[in-house]
Image: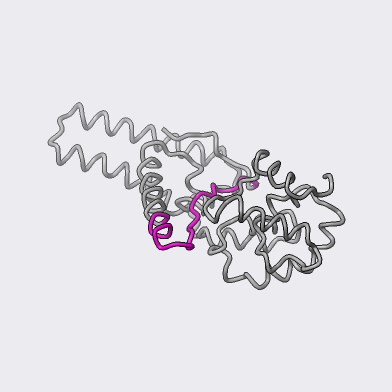
């Protein structure tokens, strides 16, 4: 049956685990193998669980999720037909499929209208990531830097200009999201030459991660970075 807990806030962000390192050939191949395995697992698990989070653009995507759901139902009937199922098997499959459709229709009925279109959206993960930067506030725009840079490569120059134009304002105001973890995701050449502390934070992250780890903003990682270079209290 469908998992209901995901119905809803547009503030929820899709999971960010499909990162593709390119430092070494073996890392690149291993990463793509991991992506293929993850996507296959998502496709199969979504058919059996109906977890609504999987419709996010950064996961399966709305239209693919919905089509995948109904293909799963269709495959159940095909399986019974090919297996020569009797009346009992047809009754069970038909009953479960009916209950699933009723559950899905109920969720759509109870859901806010603006969220229903997410089940039929053709928006890709790349388009979703870029949409963060189209916002008017820095809190939304800063999300772009945290994501896979391949997803926002088309607007890289715009993001660079935004970071360079606002860097000193952020250093002075110290917004909540302007942490060492966020700084460590900013390309080194975007950080002003005069800001030696931020440069050290970025370089320290490269030394800690050796190009293979990714910052997730954990308190432990932030503590490591702060131990290297103290920043203003937030």
Describe residue 67's horizontal placement relative to residue 193 as left or right. left
Describe residue 5's horizontal placement relative to residue 197 as left or right. left
Quarter of the rendering occupied by the N terminus: top left
Residue 70 position within the rendered picture, expressed as x and y whole percent measured from the top left? 35, 46
Question: Please, what is the dominant secondary structure of the magenta stretch?
Answer: loop
Residue 160 position within the rendered picture, expressed as x and y whole percent measured from the top left? 69, 69
Which residue is found at the position 74% from the left and 46% from the top?
226
Residue 177 vs 124, above or below: the answer is: above
134 vs 1, nearest the viewer: 134
Residue 95 position within the rendered picture, expressed as x and y whole percent measured from the top left? 31, 30
- Colouring scheme applied when the structure was drawn: one colour
Which residue is found at the position 66% from the left and 58% from the top?
203
Residue 121 position within the rendered picture, expressed as x and y whole percent measured from the top left? 50, 56
225 vs 177, nearest the viewer: 225
Q: Which residue is the extreme one toward the bottom?
A: 157
177 vs 110, nearest the viewer: 177
Residue 172 forms part of the magenta stretch: no
Q: In which quarter of the image is residue 86?
A: top left
Which residue is found at the position 61% from the left and 56% from the top?
206
Q: Which residue is the extreme one toward the left?
A: 84
Q: Which residue is the extreme one toward the top?
A: 88
Residue 115 vs 220, above or below: the answer is: below
Quarter of the rendering occupied by the C terminus: top right
Residue segment shown in magenta = 11-31
Residue 66 vs 32, above or below: the answer is: above
Residue 23 forms part of the magenta stretch: yes
Q: In which quarter of the image is residue 6?
A: top right
């Amino acid at each position: 049956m469908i998992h209901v807990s995901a119905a809803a806030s547009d503030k929820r962000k899709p999971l960010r685990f499909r990162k593709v390192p390119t430092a070494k050939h073996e890392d690149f191949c291993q990463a793509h193998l991991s992506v293929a395995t993850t996507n296959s697992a998502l496709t199969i698990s979504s058919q059996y669980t109906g977890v609504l989070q999987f419709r996010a653009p950064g996961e399966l995507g709305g239209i693919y999720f919905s089509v995948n759901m109904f293909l799963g139902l269709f495959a159940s009937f095909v399986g019974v037909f090919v297996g020569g199922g009797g009346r009992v098997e047809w009754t069970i499959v038909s009953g479960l499929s009916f209950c699933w459709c009723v559950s899905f229709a109920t969720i759509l009925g109870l859901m806010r209208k603006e969220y229903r279109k997410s089940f039929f959206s053709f928006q890709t993960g790349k388009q979703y990531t870029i949409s963060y930067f189209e916002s008017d506030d820095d809190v939304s725009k800063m999300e772009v830097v945290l994501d896979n840079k391949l997803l926002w490569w088309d607007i890289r120059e715009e993001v660079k200009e935004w970071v360079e134009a606002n860097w000193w304002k952020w250093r002075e105001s110290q917004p909540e999201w302007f942490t060492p973890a966020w700084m460590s995701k900013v390309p080194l050449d975007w950080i002003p030459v005069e800001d030696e502390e931020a440069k050290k934070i970025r370089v320290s992250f490269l030394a800690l991660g050796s190009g293979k780890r990714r910052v997730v903003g954990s308190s432990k990682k932030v503590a490591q970075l702060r131990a290297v270079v103290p920043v203003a209290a937030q």
